[in-house]
Image: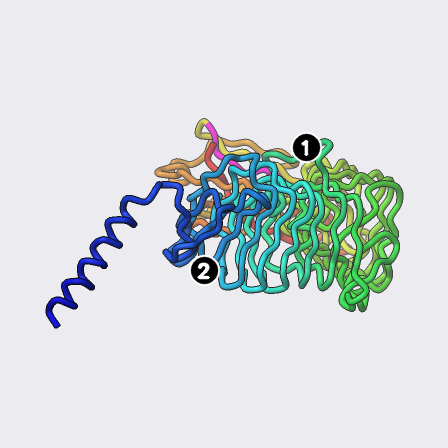
Amino acid sequence: MRKMKKVVLGMTVMSMMMSMAAPMGMPISPLGVTTVSADVRAQGRCGDNVDYQYDYSTETLTLVGKGATWDNYPIKISAGDVKHIVVDKGVTTVGTSIFSKLYDVEDVKLADTVTTIKTKAFNYISDTIEIPASVTKVETKAFDKAKNIIFKGDVIGYEIGAFGISEDNADGWDEENIAEVSLNGAADDLGKALYGADAGAITMTKENKKCRIENGCLTTADGKVLYYCINSSGKIAIPDSVESISPLAFSFVYLDEVKFGKNLKNVGDFAFANGAIKKLKVNKKLAKIGVKAFYDINIKNITFSGKVKMDVAAFDHHTKIENAKKFKYSQTTLDTANIAKKKVTVKFAKVTGAKGYEIVIKRGKKTFKYTTTKNSFTKTAPSKLTKNYEVEKTYSMENDEYLQKIKGAATVKVRPYKMVKKSKKSKKMKKSYGMWSAEMVISMS
């Protein structure tokens, strides 16, 4: 019995020695099981429970295992060798920068277990990326461009610039634009995902019952939400069925005229960002305009016929805003609020009929009030405002920075006023105020 144990032990030791002496190129399959495939050139671990394997005969890189890959762990294979990427069933998260060094990939196939794709996960994809319905989160710059995109499910959970464009690099994609985007579901975040991209065609599969196209606009099936503008020039008449416009729906669109449908109530954040409109016709039901919705798109004058609530920088300080119904509904939008060289500067849109503007700055329990007759205001900042103040906020759309709340930050708000008689018989005048603007965080520069 002992002799038998010695033989078994000897065989085990010999096996271990042979394994240790094996050539470095001998393939080890996912999770440590020896493989006999002669086509496997490289493989290794890229997650706690995820391995990669590269087959040079098919030029295919495959991820297998369970759970998430590691972040900031780019797979080391000659950049131009991989033509196809397959993320197998069981993998849930494609980590930061894992495929960022592979620049000549033709297509990517993701299993329906994948839920998250992190920033810089992929480089340029020259043919097709299919994104399964299981994906619910795609971070900014997850892809550095892709030629054809097939969304198998709803486009929800995508951060701004998911397909490669961000505010600091928003000049377009030159000759490497998206050729086609295919939709199989809702498109709530399509504007965010494709921010800055020149999508050649937006198509819907026959199975898609959640979207429709009308007047060059991609909307929900019932037409109430405008997801994305398909036309990139000319005139757009927003359908009367539309009640709200999604964020970034018209980004990088240059239009001669935009006419709001009669039922439009809400315009989303950055809805017309980085574009231009020569003429804008609003409606009577408009009630809310989001952050930087019409910022810096060369609108000189805009007239409202009712109460419209506008968020920070809905228009810039070059625009003149009029409320044709009542002055008490008049509201300006803040453009600039910063402290530099011990001076505070505030800029905002002009309001038709305003004699002046009241400015209120708050920091903690301290409040500072000013009046001005101009829409550009600069004054030496009180020491209680600038002491130990190091706040930076630009209201950038990238990574939802504009939504962030900063503890201890100073804020400013403005409202217009005009002079009216105290009574019909009195010659004395008093101030009649419009609405307060949305509060803007003051940045230190």
Q: Which residue is mark 2?
A: 65
Q: Nearer the viewer, residue 49 or 178?
A: 49
Residue 112 appears at what percent x and percent y?
A: 58, 64
Q: Residue at left 70%, top 42%?
A: 197
Q: Which residues are magenta?
A: 335-340
Picture layout, residue 215 above or below residue 232: below
Q: How many angstroms separate mark 1 from mark 2 (CA)?
A: 39 Å
Picture layout, residue 104 above or below residue 422: above
Q: Residue at left 61%, top 50%?
A: 108
Q: Is residue 57 visible?
A: yes
Residue that protrudes farthest toward the top in the picture: 341
Q: Nearer the viewer, residue 270 or 180?
A: 180
**Mark 2 packing: few (<14 Cα in 10 Å), some, or many (20+)?**
many
Q: Residue at left 56%, top 57%?
A: 137
Secondary structure mainly formed by the magenta segment: strand
Q: Which residue is mark 1?
A: 171
Residue 99 appears at what percent x and percent y?
A: 52, 43
Picture layout, residue 11 above or below residue 19: below
Question: On the picture, is 178 further left or further right than 169?
Answer: right
Question: On the picture, is 128 further left or further right than 42?
Answer: right
Q: Residue at left 82%, top 42%?
A: 232
**Mark 1 packing: few (<14 Cα in 10 Å), some, or many (20+)?**
few
Q: Is residue 419 visible?
A: no
* Count of marks overlaid on the render: 2
* Residue type at tag 2: Gly
Residue 288 is inside the magenta segment: no
- Dot 2 falls on a residue whose secondary structure is strand
Residue 176 appears at what percent x and percent y?
A: 71, 35
